[in-house]
Image (cartoon, helix red, strand yellow):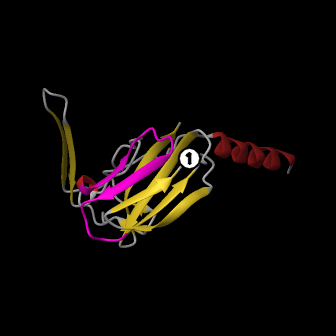
Amino acid sequence: MKTKITLLFSLILWAFSSSSQTLSPSVIALAGGYEKTPSGMTVSWTLGEPVVDPIRSANVQLTQGFQQPNLKVSTGFTDPGFAFGLSTYPNPASSELIMESDYQEEFHFRMVDVTGKIIKEGKWSNKNVIDVSLLSQGIYAIYFTAEGRMVKSDLIIKQ
C-alpha cells in the first residue's frame, strides 16, 4: 500500500511539474500568408476565420481572431472621420486652451490629470476656450467624444 501511495504521489507531482503543453496563438484556416516589401511594410492575412468582428462600446474595443494589431502607444487616438476638423492649441498652454472644430456637431470633452481625476468636462461645438491658469504645471489628458464614441484624445502640457 505504501508503494502505491508513493507512486501515486510521484505521478501527481510529475504531472504538475510537466510543462509540455503551452498556450500559444493558433488558427485553423483555409489560407494565410505574410509578405514584406523592400521598404519594410508588412502584410499578414488569414482566410476563413469564423469570428473576427470587433466588439465596441463607448470606451472599450475588443477584437477577436488570430490576426491582432500590435499595441501602439501614442499621444492620442484619432478617428479618421473626425480628426482633420478637431484641434487643441496652444500646447503647451499657460492660461487658456482653445478647442476648435470644423464640424457643427456637439462634442463632449473631459480633461483628466495623471491620476485619472476629472479636472474639467463639458459640451461644446465650433470653438471653446478653457481657462487653465489655475491648474498646476504638468501633463493632462483631454478626451473628445461625439455621438457616444471617443473621436480623439490629446496630451496637454500646462506650463
The answer, for residue 49, to whether it is visible in the render is yes
Q: Position of residue 132 (x, y in %)?
A: 53, 49
Q: 111 or 91: nearer the eye? A: 91
Residue at image location 26% in from the left, 61% down from the top: 49
Give neighbour class at mark 1: few <14, some 14-19, many 20+ (Cα, 10 Å). Answer: some
Tell which of 47 and 148 is nearer to you: 148
Residue positioned 33% across, 53% down in the render: 66
Residue 68 appears left or right of 129: left
Q: Which residues are magenta?
A: 85-106
Image quadrant assignment for residue 14: top right
Numbered disc 1: secondary structure: loop
Side of 48 where 12 appears, left or right: right
Answer left or right for 156 relative to 11: left
* Kind of residue at badge 1: Ser
For this orientation, the residue located farthest to the right is 2
Label 1 sits on residue: 133
Judging depth in this view, the residue of 28 and 85 nearest the camera is 85
Residue furthest to the top in view is 38
Q: Position of residue 15 (x, y in %)?
A: 65, 45
> In the rendered image of this protein, does residue 152 appear above or below residue 18?
below
Q: Within the magenta stretch, is there residue 88?
A: yes
